[in-house]
Image (cartoon, rainbow, N blue to C red):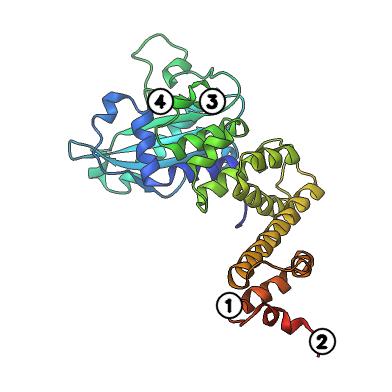
Amino acid sequence: MAELHNPHDTLFRALLSDPGRARDFLRDHLPNTIVGQLAPAPPEILEGSFVDEALAGSQSDLLMKVALTSGTDAFVYVLAEHKSTPDPALPLQLASYMVRIWKRCAGTGTARLRALPPIIPVVVYHGAEPWTVPDSLRDMIATDDPDLAFLPGAGYILRNLRAMEIDALSRNAALRAGFITLRQEALAFLAEIAGSLPEGTDLRRQVLEYVLRVYNVDLDALRATLRTGGHNELEALMGTIAETLLEQGEARGLAKGEARGLAKGEAKGKAEGKAETLGRQLERRFGPLPRDIETRIAAAAPDRIEAWLDAVLDAPDLAAVFAQDRPH
């Protein structure tokens, strides 16, 4: 794996950097009055972050450009709040990020300053504590006189993942699995997550990496759960990730021996699988195997099994497969 960054930021970006999942997110989480104005095309994910450097460990952001049915464009700015307790300064921070976006959009052209695109701010929160942050900057200003309340932004759309029903998280199965993981509930929904994230996909690895980096897991219990559920590929992938995380000092709640034991278990499982494959191929070509051959295969090292697997393709009989091992 490449250099590891903040686990919350890594998973958040993995979930929404895919245009298809980003489109589903907008249709699931924006008000119907806004969704009805979105053109069918998926959003364009724009490069860059506007989060203050000092807050980069607790906030992530993503800027999307969306086409409207009117023929114009708008921005959707998604800010993820990763603190377990909400930050009451967030509306002020959000307003400054929106101003930065408009400044970048306008550049040095005065004409652009007279036609700034709309920015739809969305805050995604998955912390454990209730959301107690003001709804807008207006609620933070100490005046009841609207003539004195000059605001850069009227408010934001809050999506509190913890307060939502599971089915309401998203109609996109992969996106829902990622949000469940951010909610710290992946272990309770392993079957759904395994079924929603196909084998071999980057997001499957990223979700499992997030669990190992952020959750306090009982590795043996998790292995047993995965094995019982028939998720052998997830168990093997976990071993690879756990060993890498441990080497980089990123694993949380994992003992070094546990991670290495998991990796060894993965290697043992692969070797046993190759031995079974060899046995099946030999029986298919030459019939039932003698007991001494079965014993020999069971005790063989992985590289020896590999050599026999190669030999079985061209050998005229059973003895020829193992002839290369006999002393001359």
Which mark sits nearer the N-terminus, 3 or 2? 3
Q: Which amino acid does label 2 sit on?
A: Pro
Q: Nearer the viewer, mark 3 or mark 4?
A: 4
Q: Nearer the viewer, mark 1 or mark 3?
A: 1
Q: In this view, does 288 lie to the left or right of 38?
A: right
On the question of residue 26 being in view, the answer is yes
Q: Which of marks 3 and 2 is in front?
A: 2
Disc 3 from disc 4: Cα separation: 13 Å
Residue on which the image places disc 4: 156
| Rendered residue at 76%/64% (across/down) | 298
Which mark sits nearer the N-terminus, 3 or 4? 3
Disc 1 from disc 3: Cα separation: 69 Å
Q: Which mark is residue 163?
A: none
State which quarter of the image contains the C terminus.
bottom right
Q: What element carries label 3?
A: loop
Q: Is mark 2 on a helix, strand or loop?
A: loop
Residue on which the image places disc 2: 327
Of 146 and 203, the residue lying toward us: 203
Disc 1 from disc 2: Cα separation: 22 Å
Q: Residue furthest left?
A: 70
Of 266 and 256, the residue lying toward us: 266
Disc 1 from disc 4: Cα separation: 65 Å
Disc 3 from disc 2: Cα separation: 78 Å
On the question of residue 103 being in view, the answer is no
Which mark sits nearer the N-terminus, 1 or 3? 3
Q: What residue type is labelled 4?
A: Tyr
Q: Residue 313 carries which label?
A: 1
| 155 in relation to 2, above or below | above
Q: Residue furthest top?
A: 144
Residue 261, position as x, y percentages in the image: 78, 51
Residue on which the image places disc 3: 89
